[in-house]
Image (tube, rainbow, N blue to C red):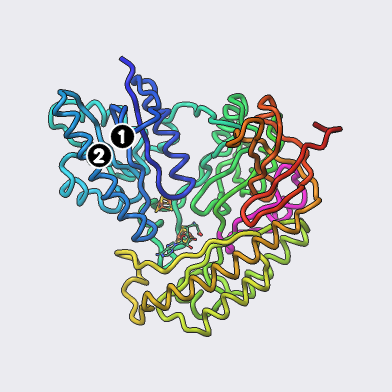
Amino acid sequence: MPKKLFIRTYGCQMNVYDSARMADVLAPLGYHAAQEVDEADMVIVNTCHIREHASEKVFSELGRLRDLKAARAAAGQGLIIAVAGCVAQAEGKEIMARAPYVDIVLGPQTYHRLPEMVARASRAGGRVLDTDFPAEAKFDHLPEPTAQGPSAFLSVQEGCDKFCTFCVVPYTRGAEYSRPAAAILAEARALIAGGACEITLLGQNVNGYHGDSPDGGHWGLGRLIRALAELPGLARLRYTTSHPRDLDDDLIAAHGEVPQLMPFLHLPVQSGSDRILAAMNRQHTAAEYLRLVERLRAARPDLALSSDFIVGFPGESDRDFEDSLALVRAVGFAQSYSFKYSPRPGTPAAALEQQVPDAVKEERLAAFHALIGEQSAAFNRACLGRSFDVLLERPGRRDGQLIGRSPYMQSVFVEAPAAMLNTVRRLRITDTHPNSLAGTLIESEA
Ligand code: SAH
Ligand code: SF4
Ligand code: F3S
């Protein structure tokens, strides 16, 4: 009997990828995507534990689902509630205890076992907690992915061994693991056959990739990218998220040599102060980061960069914060994300003295936003009159309008027929806004 599945996804792109794969795993059981949570027979909340704010959302979401489940029960119907992702991994037992209406709690490494978990949960009272890091590789047990639109995610690496002192990821996602290149190439072919023309390679520390290669050796990310670029029909490649320490010469060179590799790189730095970088266990200095940026730009002069910053890490002084602003000015980012430091249970930084008061974090965050907002607006303004290739991804709000993505990740609005969806077109940028661009088709090539 057909059933409906609704997945709510929080957190990073890895979670977006995992959610799609969970849907793939459950499809043979008759589950199809529900448009609204109200019509679902099963709901999965795929959670993120990165900051306190992200975790809190999970429990309020679960409260709403408890009410939905109660309403269903009153009508003699069922609802399976599953909690997946990084909160499930970190706080699985607590969720089982606090939320008795939750049927399944599963970590990011066990979702290939979902069919079995659903079968157990469907039997009266059968609740399941599965947050193992199983010996068998999850990826070997997943069905072929279904491409969803022209731009697809592909996980090539999982987990992280860097242990930045503020971060939960090494605990929730476990040790670094790289998928074999052959499996990645096969998945990429399936995605392209399903209509994808852009693939974003994912990993918590994606440029730490070192997978088995078809010739019996190992490939780094640069080599993998070169192999993927040879697949017919693949117009664009991206990868995220990278650690500055693992950006090797071959990957830097690939930026200059592989035309499919888009000239945009998210390279988190977290702080511009060497003292704070050391306390964060980032294993690089501000000068080393700037040097990497220089080398990347030498390889690919039009490369645009984005980054993540944490403000108010324990012990961060005004001077340290000034160093972060100075690094932002020195690089000139196309985009950046900044977060107030959030103490996470079990991480070394949470136990540090000299926690920064929230009011100071707020003030620094505002100053930061102002500066990076200025930079990204300036980056967009500088695109006026330029022409570039845009992947037309989805219909706009107005009839006859499509929305695409520039090589630099900007949203671009254009008047174009719906038949051009899912294709790359050359546009001239005619108008710029702080967060988007507008363009017109260049006729000769349209
Ligand atoms: N693997 C990636 C991304 C990790 S999480 C990397 O190495 O950068 C995404 C971002 O969340 C991080 O880059 C960091 O800026 C932010 N973040 C992680 N833990 C945090 C915490 N405890 N408080 C505030 N921001 C945090
Ligand atoms: Fe977290 Fe650092 Fe690993 Fe990124 S590199 S996932 S910030 S521990
Ligand atoms: Fe969040 Fe886990 Fe991703 S904590 S950012 S969902 S790896």
The location of residue 335, given as percent across then percent down, is 61, 59
Q: Amino acid at mark 2?
A: Leu
Q: Is residue 381 magenta?
A: no
Q: Is residue 244 magenta?
A: yes
The location of residue 292, given as percent across then percent down, is 67, 66
The residue indicated by pointer 1 is 43
- Tell me the number on the disc at residue 65: 2
- The residue positioned 37% from the left and 44% from the top of the image is 108
- The residue positioned 47% from the left and 83% from the top of the image is 317
The location of residue 200, given as percent across then percent down, is 59, 42
Q: Quadrant of the C terminus?
A: top right
- The residue positioned 80% from the left and 46% from the top of the image is 387
Along the polypeptide, which appears first: circle 2 or circle 1? Answer: 1
Q: Amino acid at mark 1?
A: Val
Could you tell me if the residues under marks 2 and 1 are in contact, i.e. CB atoms within 8 Å? Answer: yes
| Position above or below: 203 against 305 | above
